[in-house]
Amino acid sequence: MSQPAVRTDPIAVVERLRDATNAHDLDGIVACFAPDYRNETPLHPARGFAGNDQVRRNWTHILASIPDVSTEIVASLAAVDTVWTEWEHRGTRPDGSAHLMRGVIVFGVRAGVIATARFFLEPVGDAGDDVDAAVQRQVRPGSS
């Protein structure tokens, strides 16, 4: 009996990543990325990297540290080979505290795998600052 064909349209590639992540399938996660994958993290430029070996290292650590991690694609939109996605990651850290990240990842898909990503996924802040305090801190660092 033949295996079902792997869908390679850009949205399906990103959904495959979500499914592998929720299944805690490390090899499946890594298989979603091109060997020469390039990750850019514009808010933290030093965190950018190249290669799916780093994807394996990252997810090995994440799956070991947050064994109940789950992901949800909140919204997505594809244009040719670019997929704009909004994500939510949830789980429990080793100390019992909640792991919660939300944000956007813009994927570039090539030949059925993720070739690039611009990563804007961040931990959700639990500080009680309102919008006025946040704006004040942005325009006058060090003020309250």
Image (cartoon, rainbow, N blue to C red):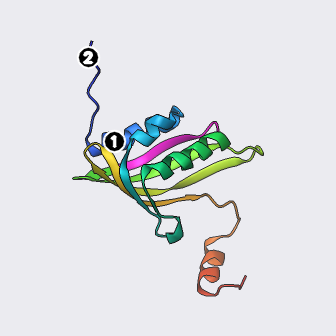
Q: Nearer the viewer, residue 7 or 132?
A: 7
> Up-down: is 36 above or below 24?
below
The span picked out in magenta is: 67-76
SS at badge 1: helix
> Up-down: is 35 above or below 132?
above
Does the image show residue 99?
yes
- Residue named by callout 1: 13
Q: Is residue 45 magenta?
A: no
Q: Quadrant of residue 60?
A: top right
Q: Residue at x 32, y 45 (%)?
A: 113
User: Which quadrant is home to the N terminus?
Assistant: top left
Amino acid type at circle 2 is Ser
Mark found first going from the N terminus, 2 or 1: 2
- The picture places residue 27, in percent across and down from the top left corner, at 47, 35
Q: Residue at x 30, y 50 (%)?
A: 109
- The picture places residue 92, in percent across and down from the top left corner, at 68, 42
Alpha-carbon neighbours of circle 1 within 10 Å: few (<14), some, or many (≥20)?
Answer: many
Q: Is residue 68 magenta?
A: yes
Q: Nearer the viewer, residue 39 or 16?
A: 39
Side of 82 where 67 appears, left or right: right
> Up-down: is 9 above or below 38?
above
Q: Nearer the viewer, residue 39 or 84?
A: 39
Amino acid type at circle 1 is Val
- Residue named by callout 2: 2
Tell me the mark number nearer the camera, choosing from 2 and 1: 2
Does the image show residue 84?
no
In the current view of this chain or complex, which residue is farthest to the left? 80
Alpha-carbon neighbours of circle 2 within 10 Å: few (<14), some, or many (≥20)?
Answer: few
SS at badge 2: loop
> Up-down: is 5 above or below 15?
above
In the current view of this chain or complex, which residue is farthest to the right? 95
